Image (cartoon, rainbow, N blue to C red):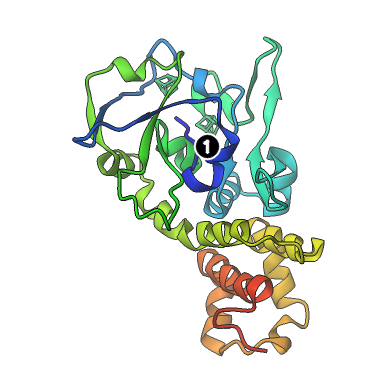
Amino acid sequence: MREVEGKVVLDQNEHLNLKPILEDGKFKFKCYPGISCFNECCHEIDVILTPFDVLRMKNQLGIKSDEFLAKYTHLQKLKGTDIPLVKLKMHDAEDKKNHCVFLCEKGCTVYESRPAVCRNYPTGLATQDPNSGESSNPFFIIEEKMCQGHFEKEEWTVDSWKKNQGVTELDELSKPWMELVARLKSCSLKDASDQKMNFFLMACFDLDTFSNFVFNSSFLQKFKIDEETTQKIKTDEEALLKFGFEWLKFVLFKEGSFQT
Ligand code: SF4
Ligand code: SF4
C-alpha cells in the first residue's frame, strides 16, 4: 500500500530492505482485503506527500489546504537540508501501535486519493548520480517482513504496477516538483531565507493560501501574467499548482518564464 518515493524520500528510509528488480524487470506481488497482513503496512511509517497528493486528499475530504496540513500532517526537513517535506501523521492508538491517520479497520479511508507513496508500494526509485553514466534499472522492491504480498503469484513490471495503481499520471504531474526539490538539494542553499522556504511550502502544499496570496495581494500587479493564465488559475487548482512551481523557479533560482 505504500512506498518510499524515490529520489526525494529514499534517504529517510535507510532501514528498509530494498532489493533490486530482476533483470527481466518482473516481480510478484498482490495486496487485497483479506490477506493476513491487511493494514499492517499502514503503521509506524513515513508517508511523504507530494503537492498533488495534498491537493487530491483535501478535495476528497472537502476541506481547505491549511486545515488539511494542520490536522493530518507534520513537517519534516529533507535529510541534511532545510527543504520542508510534508508527512502524514501517525495516530497513537490504544494498542500502542502508531498508524496512519487515515487508517480504519476496513482499510484506507482516503483510498481514492491515497498518496503516490502508498500507490507505488512495494516499488521504489533509487537515486542515481546523473554524472555516473550508469543506466541500470533504477527501480527496486521494498521487502518488509510483515508483508505477505510478496508470496503471491501475480506478476508485474514497474510500468504495469504503476498503471494498475493509477500512479503513472501522478508521477508525470509531480515531475516539476521533484525537479525543484532535486535542484534545491543540489544547491548549498546557504542564501535560502526562511521566507523562500515558506514560499516553497505555501505554493507546493498550501494551495488555498497560495490562491489567496495571488489574488488578494499585489502579486498580479508585480508580475506580468496574461489574462488567459489569470482566468485559468482562478478555477483550475492543478493549473494553479503548476503556476506555483513556475513562480518558485523565479523566487528560488531567478529562472523560468516569470517576469516582473
Ligand atoms: S494513506 Fe491510506 S494507504 Fe496510505 S498509509 Fe495511510 S491508510 Fe495506508
Ligand atoms: S500485502 Fe503488503 S502492502 Fe498489502 S496489506 Fe499486506 S503488508 Fe500491506
> Would you name the residue on which mark 1 appears?
110
Q: Quarter of the image holding residue 71?
A: top right
Ligand 2's image quarter is: top left
**Is residue 9 shown left or right of residue 137?**
right
Residue closest to the far right: 194
Q: Quadrant of the N terminus?
A: top left
Q: Secondary structure at mark 1?
A: loop
Establish whether ligand 1 lies closer than 8 Å to the Cβ of label 1: yes
29 over 51 or under it: above or below? above
Q: Residue at x 69, y 17 (%)?
A: 93
Q: Position of residue 102 (x, y in %)?
A: 59, 31
Q: Position of residue 150 (x, y in %)?
A: 33, 19
Residue closest to the far front: 132
The mark total stands at 1
> Which residue type does callout 1 highlight?
Val
Q: Residue at x 30, y 50 (%)?
A: 135
Q: Position of residue 63 (x, y in %)?
A: 66, 49
Foreground: 213 or 20? 20
72 over 213 or under it: above or below? above
Q: Position of residue 130 (x, y in %)?
A: 43, 57
Q: Quarter of the image holding residue 121?
A: top left
Q: Residue at x 30, y 24 (%)?
A: 29
Q: Residue at x 55, y 57 (%)?
A: 182
59 over 97 or under it: above or below? below
**Is residue 167 shown left or right of residue 229?**
left
